[in-house]
Amino acid sequence: MSIQHNVSLKEFNTFGIDAKAKKFITITNISELLVALQLTEFSEYFVLGGGSNMLLTQDIELPVLHINNKGKRVVYTTNNEVVVEIQAGENWHEFVLWCIENDFGGVENLSLIPGNVGTSPIQNIGAYGVELKDTFVRCTAIDIETQEQKVFMLDDCNFGYRNSIFKNEAKGKYIITSVVFKLTHKNHKLNTSYGAIQEELAHNNITNPTIKNVSDAVIAIRERKLPNPKEIGNSGSFFKNPVISKADFDTLEASHSTIPHYVISDTEIKVPAGWLIEQCGFKGKRYGDAGVHKNQALVLVNYDNATGAEILALAKKIQETVLEKFNIAIEAEVNVI
């Protein structure tokens, strides 16, 4: 365990915001985490994983616990299933690549999502028709107040669209230390239903795809559409795709016949927030060092030295404009600190 003072968090958040941490504690195993939580002068902490789903708008006065424990292991295998346990500090995309290399299927559609494994259940990360909950078995967490270990099974997590118990009643109470997944290792059930994946596979003349083919397709699509956080600061999709009633959608479609949409149920329709934002004229716009990406209006970017407050002001302006034009409220997917 290392303790540093007045540390810039610019390299620890994918937006590249230069906020400061008054005290920065690096955690590489559970024993170190327990020691840190028992430091008597502190009662609250700021838990930092891969820094991929946050917008820092201020310096962090609380002690920052950087969860950086590593490790991947196979728990057991059956005829067509493999259960693996991944430590919280592992990079999510590197975990996906490890699965591909070992012919473990189930997370290939989640390739190239930024962040660490430990924070993936908080958001119930998802992409191209697949969500974390589809392969999630359980996660182990430490109760910050009691330092006791707790296991959260699938049903305990209350997973929803980009949502979980860890964003609601358990918010700020636990630190996830590892996650267990159930994957396939023989007869993979591929999800290529999203048109973009089908188009990419067809473009490469692939008619009988493997999990690697699907992963490669997702990576290619994401690299074309989304900026690399190492090159330009961003946190991926900044807003959730809103779900509206079918009645409201029918009214909207009457005046916008080309609106893309996904049917959730007989009464609910999901509308792409990126499309709404683009229709409001924000795509590719820049306001100082804060802006909206030229290829994907769902992504807000830090071109150089934008502050978190400047990014947040742009986000609020977008929300207000979308609400005024479409009467649809879009929510931030990113956690604003």
Image: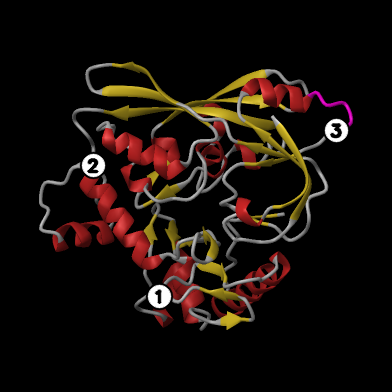
Q: Is residue 63 left or right of residue 251?
A: right
**Amino acid type shown at disc 1:** Glu
State the image coordinates of residue 226 (x, y, percent, origin top left): 42, 64
Q: Quadrant of residue 1?
A: top right
- Is residue 11 inside the magenta stretch? no
Find out whether the residues at labels 2 and 1 contact each other: C-beta distance under 8 Å.
Answer: no
Could you tell me which secondary element the residue under label 2 belongs to? helix
Q: Nearer the viewer, mark 3 or mark 2?
A: 3
- Of the 4 image quadrants, the one containing the C terminus is bottom right
Assess whether mark 2 and mark 3 are in contact (beta carbons under 8 angstroms): no
Q: Nearer the viewer, residue 173 or 14?
A: 14
Q: Magenta stretch: residue 41 in it? A: yes
Residue pictured at 53% horizontal, 80% vertical:
282
Give the residue at mark 3: 42
- Label of residue 253 in the image: 1
Q: Amino acid at mark 2?
A: Ile
Q: Which residue is found at the position 54% from the left and 62% from the top?
A: 234
Residue 220 image point, x, y percent? 30, 59
Q: Say which element carries label 3.
A: loop
In front of the other: 105 or 131: 105
Earlier in the chain: of badge 1 and badge 3, it is: 3
Q: Which numbered disc, 1 or 3, marks the residue closer to the eye?
A: 3
Give the Cα separation between the discs numbered 1 and 3.
54 Å
Residue located at (42% from left, 71% from top) = 250
Q: What's the amino acid at mark 3?
A: Phe
**Residue range of the region highlighted in magenta in the rendering:** 38-42
Residue beneath disc 2: 211
Residue 124, placed above or below residue 302: above
